[in-house]
Image (tube, helix red, strand yellow):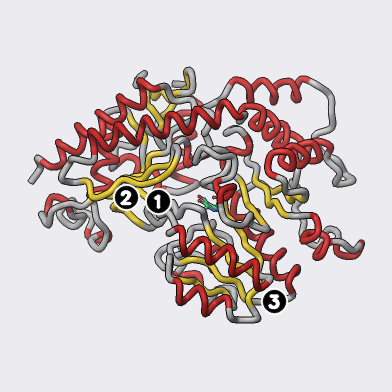
């Protein structure tokens, strides 16, 4: 392995986050990764890994997709400015126009991380309505900046950082009465929700509740914000997962794979009238801004990513999603450790339920600090690492394994991963 890179892993432990390094070592997480071949990760010993997490969603087109690399190389080999002092990036213009063609939203604010797009949405809805209150949904994950953390599910991502942004209320997921009560409040500016709550365990909203949420917000001039940072850009088999909601959201956030897996890039999309209602005066035109917003390299990657994500690719996500789901239902669902399988497209969750035996508990495994959490998900992740698969549990629901492979995964790889899952589950069942 390249000596400098190797040192980088040690330096990460020393200067970035020692516990992340320790966790990776303890759980046999493949982290001494050296190269990519045909979208797959290869470690320093030459072992190949299939990334069923798609780099937390960023690598939807596979690792180092050649088309994105080529677009970035073409830009770097040219002489176009990489930064526009006027703030007018033509690449941002082209990307915003492509997103408009694809989604119908005709106003875009670009940022780098997902949580920045969410922050832009929170400020937009308060500015647009002149109302202070924002409702989110219990179980949410919208990122780690203060606005997003104010909407975060209670727990380690939220609790120690209070006091939180005021007038943010978390509605119980699927609770019709709580929804009606929130809608009746004239101070409500917006409801923010994820089409699928991934970190809460790949939870899909009930259709009647979602319909009421869509219609109720429309009736009362409450803005509807869909955080599609996980579900957007084809993950569910549609460009936007919210495309089939009874009412199109007023604001949508995208991130993760938008930069083609090579550049950090996110966007908040909305309608021009809403955007101009807040930023439509000269004095306020840049009242919400970010230095690198719409930077050339990120937008070049974004344009190449949208070229890849055509109708044929969306159809492939739907087809592969069905193939994966059918195979999981046949091979994985019968395991006594599996309670439920749910999701859409290539965003699936497998809910586990371990017997009450010490071998499935963190204190028995020597990590009493985590004793309140179920260990079965992590045990499965660990077994899958050993078998050459990268997966993870959901951030707020450790009993749910998320399976969200790259769209480029082959049918054979999908079926092989289902069999590896079944083998790992059988092994874990036999532990007791
Ligand atoms: C639904 C959702 N929103 C927002 C974010 C935050 O994105 P980022 O980590 O890029 O800030 C995430 C991250 O996983 C997410 O899943």
Residue on which the image places disc 2: 400
Mark 2 vs mark 3: which is more N-terminal?
Answer: 3
Q: Which image quadrant for residue 70?
A: top right
Mark 2 lies on a secondary structure that is strand
Mark 2 Cα shell of 10 Å, populated few (<14), some (14-19), many (≥20): many
Q: Check residue 404 in the rendering and tell me which mark sits there, or answer none.
A: none
Side of 248 where 6 appears, left or right = left
Side of 354 where 290 appears, left or right = right
Residue 360: x %, y % from top left: 16, 51
Mark 3 Cα shell of 10 Å, populated few (<14), some (14-19), many (≥20): some
Residue on which the image places disc 3: 131
Q: Nearer the viewer, mark 1 or mark 2?
A: 1
Mark 3 lies on a secondary structure that is loop
Side of 19 where 427 appears, left or right = left
Residue sitting at the far right: 282
Q: Is residue 323 above or below residue 281?
A: above
Mark 3 vs mark 1: which is more N-terminal?
Answer: 3
* Number of marks in picture: 3
Residue on which the image places disc 1: 202
Q: Nearer the viewer, residue 85 or 317?
A: 317
Q: Do the residues bearing badges 1 and 2 touch, measured as CB atoms within 8 Å?
A: yes
The residue under the point 87% across, 61% down is 280
Residue 156: x %, y % from top left: 41, 63
The residue under the point 46% across, 62% down is 208
Quadrant in which the N terminus appears: top left
């Amino acid at each position: 392995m390249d000596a400098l890179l190797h040192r980088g892993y040690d330096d990460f432990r020393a200067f970035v986050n020692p516990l992340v390094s320790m966790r990776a070592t303890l759980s046999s997480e493949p982290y001494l990764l050296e190269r990519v071949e045909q979208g797959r990760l290869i470690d320093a010993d030459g072992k190949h890994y299939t990334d069923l997490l798609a780099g937390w969603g960023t690598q939807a087109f596979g690792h180092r997709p050649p088309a994105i690399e080529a677009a970035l190389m073409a830009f770097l080999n040219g002489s176009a400015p990489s930064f526009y002092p006027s703030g007018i990036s033509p690449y941002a213009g082209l990307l915003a126009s492509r997103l408009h063609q694809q989604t119908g939203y005709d106003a875009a604010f670009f940022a780098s991380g997902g949580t920045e797009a969410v922050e832009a949405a929170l400020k937009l809805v308060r500015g647009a309505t002149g109302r202070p209150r924002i409702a989110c949904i219990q179980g949410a994950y919208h990122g780690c900046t203060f606005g997003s953390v104010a909407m975060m599910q209670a727990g380690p991502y939220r609790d120690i950082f209070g006091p939180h942004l005021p007038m943010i209320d978390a509605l119980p997921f699927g609770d019709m009465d709580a929804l009606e009560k929130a809608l009746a409040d004239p101070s409500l500016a917006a409801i923010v929700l994820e089409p699928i709550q991934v970190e809460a365990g790949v939870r899909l909203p009930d259709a009647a509740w979602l319909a009421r949420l869509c219609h109720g917000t429309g009736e009362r001039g409450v803005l509807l914000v869909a955080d599609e940072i996980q579900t957007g850009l084809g993950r569910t088999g549609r460009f936007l997962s919210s495309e089939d909601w009874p009412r199109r959201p007023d604001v949508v956030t995208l991130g993760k794979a938008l930069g083609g897996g090579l550049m950090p890039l996110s966007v908040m999309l909305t309608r021009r009238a809403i955007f101009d209602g807040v930023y439509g005066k000269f004095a306020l035109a840049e009242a919400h801004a970010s230095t690198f917003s719409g930077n050339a390299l990120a937008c070049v990657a974004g344009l190449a990513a949208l070229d890849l994500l055509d109708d044929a690719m969306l159809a492939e996500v739907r087809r592969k999603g069905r193939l994966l789901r059918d195979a999981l239902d046949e091979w994985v669902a019968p395991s006594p450790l599996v309670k439920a399988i749910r999701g859409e497209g290539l965003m699936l969750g497998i809910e586990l339920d371990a017997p009450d035996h010490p071998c499935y508990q963190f204190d028995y495994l020597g990590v009493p600090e985590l004793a309140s959490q179920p260990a079965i998900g992590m045990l499965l992740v660990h077994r899958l690492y050993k078998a050459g698969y990268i997966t993870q549990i959901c951030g707020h629901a450790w009993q749910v394994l998320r399976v969200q492979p790259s769209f480029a995964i082959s049918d054979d790889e999908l079926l092989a991963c289902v069999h590896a899952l079944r083998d790992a589950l059988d092994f874990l069942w036999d532990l007791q």
